[in-house]
Structure formats: structure tokens, C-alpha cells
Image (cartoon, rainbow, N blue to C red):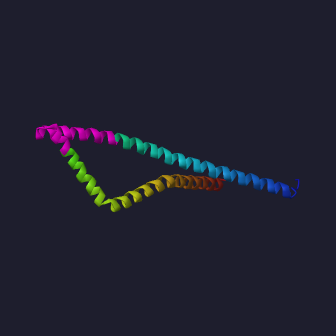
Amino acid sequence: MEEEKFSLSGTFQKTKEYIDSQFKLVKLKTIERSSRLIASLVVDATKLIFTLFVLFFLCLALGFWLGELLGSYSLGFLATAGIFLVIIILIRVFEPMLESKFMDLSIRRFLAKWNDEIEEEEEELHKDKLDRERATNEQ
């Protein structure tokens, strides 16, 4: 059997390759997590747009319905605007509380999307470790 000689330049080369590999791995993980978050934002934006369309048409229906009840479409849409004015005032009164709740919700959602990937990696590593242990025990 040949003896391997210690080579300082070989060690530096392997260290450089290792650091490059780790840098690429971190870069790929960051890209994957970022793309997961962006995809989530796109889906949420799409849901928001369609929700706004539904709300818009419901408001139109409410305006026409109240217009028929009040005998004038103008009064119906005025009553609808009044309802929205009351909602806006309520939001303004409870703004600090609502803001903190939505911030908390958005942070939890962001971290959940980010941590899903970490948990999946940990589960995969644990599964690989168990597989290696079983393979070692079978030999």
C-alpha cells in the first residue's frame, strides 16, 4: 500500500473546494427559500385581487338592492357608502390593535414558510442517518 504524503498545497486546495461548495450550497438554499416566499406572495396577491373583485360586485349588488328597497338607486348607493364609512371609522379607531395583529400574522406566516424548508431538511437528514444505521447494523 502506498503511503500518502501530506501536502500543504493539496490541503489548501481541498479547503478552497470545500469553502466554494459551502458557499454554493448556502446560495442555492437562499434562492430556494426566496423563491418559495415569492411564490407564496404571488398566490396571496392573486387571492387578494379575486377577493376584491368579489367584494366589488357584492357592493354593487348591495347598492342596487338597497336602491330598490329605498325606491332610488342613488339612495341605495349612498347607504352603501355610509356602511363603508362606518367600517372605515371602525378600522381607524382600532388601527393600532389591527396593525399589531396583522404584523404578528405576517411574521408568523413568513417564518412558517422559511422554517418549512429547514424542518424538511432536518427530517431528511434524520431519515438518512437512520438508513445508514440500519445498513451498518445489517452488515
**Residue 107 x/y as whole percent:** 44, 57
Choose between 64 and 125: the one closer to the eye.
64
Q: Residue at x 37, y 59 (%)?
A: 99
Residue located 42% across and 55% down the image: 106
Residue 41: x percent and y percent? 45, 46
Marks counted in the figure total 0
Residue 77 falls in image quadrant: top left
Task: Return the residue nearer the eye: 106 or 12.
Answer: 106
Q: Position of residue 1 (x, y in %)?
A: 88, 53
- On whether residue 74 falls in the magenta region, the answer is yes
- Residue 69: x and y, percent? 11, 40
Q: Is residue 59 left or right of residue 112?
A: left
Left or right relative to 114: residue 56:
left
Q: Residue at x 43, y 43 (%)?
A: 43
- Region of the chain picked out in magenta, as a range: 51-78
Would you say residue 88 sits in the magenta stretch? Answer: no
Residue at x 28%, y 60% (from the top left corner): 93
Of 54 and 3, nearer the camera is 54
- Left or right: residue 76 versus residue 43 is left
Q: Mostly what secondary structure, the magenta segment?
A: helix
Rendered image quadrant of residue 80: top left
In screen coordinates, is 70 left or right of 132? left
